[in-house]
Amino acid sequence: MKTDRAFHLKLYEQLVLIREFEERVKFLFLEGTMPGTIHQCQGQEATAVGVCAALRPDDFITSTFRGHGHALAKGLSVQEMLDELFGATTGCCKGKGGSMHMGNMDKGMVPGIAIVAGGIPLAAGMALAFKLQRRPQVVACFFGDGAVAEGAFHEGVNMAAIWDLPVILVCENNLYGASTRIDKVMKNPRVSDRAASYGFRGETVDGNDVLAVYAAAQRAAEECRAGKGPVLLELLTYRRTGHSRRDACHYQAKDEREAWFARDPIERFAVQLLDRGDVSQADLDAIKADVDRQITAGVENAKRAPQPTLADLTTDVFA
C-alpha cells in the first residue's frame, strides 16, 4: 500500500475533482449562467474513477446522460468540458453536445448517449470490431439500474456473451431509475445475477469504495483481454442529488439518505489515506485547493470562450 502513495493520491484528486466540478456546475445552472439541463453524479464518483483507472489510454468507454464524472475520469479536461457546457466552439464537442452528450473520441470516450441503455449495443459493436481486428482493447460500458429493463440491455449483453466480446458492463446501481426504486420493478434486484443467464461472470461491488471498484475493474479488464468474454460489474452506489436539476429527491427516505451519505466515497477514501501514515491532512487540503483553482480558472475562461455562429448549424451534420 505504501508504494502506491502517488497513485492513491491521484485517485483522491479525481474523486474531489468530480465532486467539486459537479457542485460548481450545479450553482452555475441554478443562477442561470449556463444553458440546458444537467444530470449530476455527486456521490457516485468512485464508480467512474475506479473503473477508468483500470483502463488503458486506448481503451474506450460509453457513457450516459449522467456522464460528467466518466468524462473527467477518462481524461477529459476541466476546460474542454466547461467550454462545452457554456456552448462554446472550443468545447469537447464544439458546444453541440452539452451536458448530456459529453465526450472526446481522441481520449477514448464516445459522447454520452442520453437514450437509456443506448450505449450497451454500441459498446458490444465496438468490442466486436476490436476482436475482429485483433486489437487488445476493452470497452467499459456505463449504465444505470434502470437500463436493465430495456430491450437494448438484453440484445447488447447477449451479443457480447455469444461472441465473447471484451466488454466490461458497468451497472451503476444507485437504487433509482429516475424516481422509481429498483425493488419496485425487479423481483430480483441483484443486477449481477443476470450475467449467469447469459453465460458469463457477474460481480456485485461496493461502488462507494474506489479501491474495491478499481480491483474489480482490473480483474474484469484482464479477463476481457484474455478472450474470456464480457463481465458484468454491479457497483452499488447512491446519488446525493436529484435525477435532474429540478428533482428534489422527495422519494428518497430520510434514513436511507443518511445511511448512504455516511458512506460517502470521498470521505471514506480520505480516512483510508490518512491511515496510511505517509499522507497528511495538509496533502488532502492542497489537492482540494488546487482543484478549486483549476475549476475557477476554467469557469472564467469558459465565459469568454467563442460561441458558435449561424454557419456552424450545418457543420458536423451526417444525416
Image: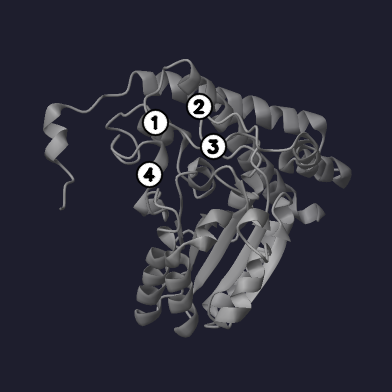
Check disc 1 and give the amino acid type.
Leu
Q: Position of residue 97 (x, y in %)?
A: 33, 40
Q: Return the mark for residue 85.
A: 1
Image side of residue 71 versus residue 290, left or right: left
The quadrant in which residue 267 appears is top right
Q: Which residue is under mark 4?
A: 101
Query: If you read the primary sequence from the N terminus, does the residue marked by circle 3 or circle 2 appear first?
Result: 2
Which residue is painted at 58% across and 83% down in the image?
A: 199
Q: Position of residue 299 (x, y in %)?
A: 45, 22
Q: In this picture, is 296 found above or below 187? A: above
Which residue is painted at 55% across and 80% down in the image?
A: 198
Q: Residues within 10 Å of mark 3 (few under 14, many from 20)?
A: many
Q: Which residue is under mark 3?
A: 40
Residue at mark 1 to residue at mark 2: CA–CA distance: 9 Å
Dots 1 and 2: beta carbons under 8 Å?
Answer: yes
Q: Which element carries disc 1, helix, strand or loop?
A: helix
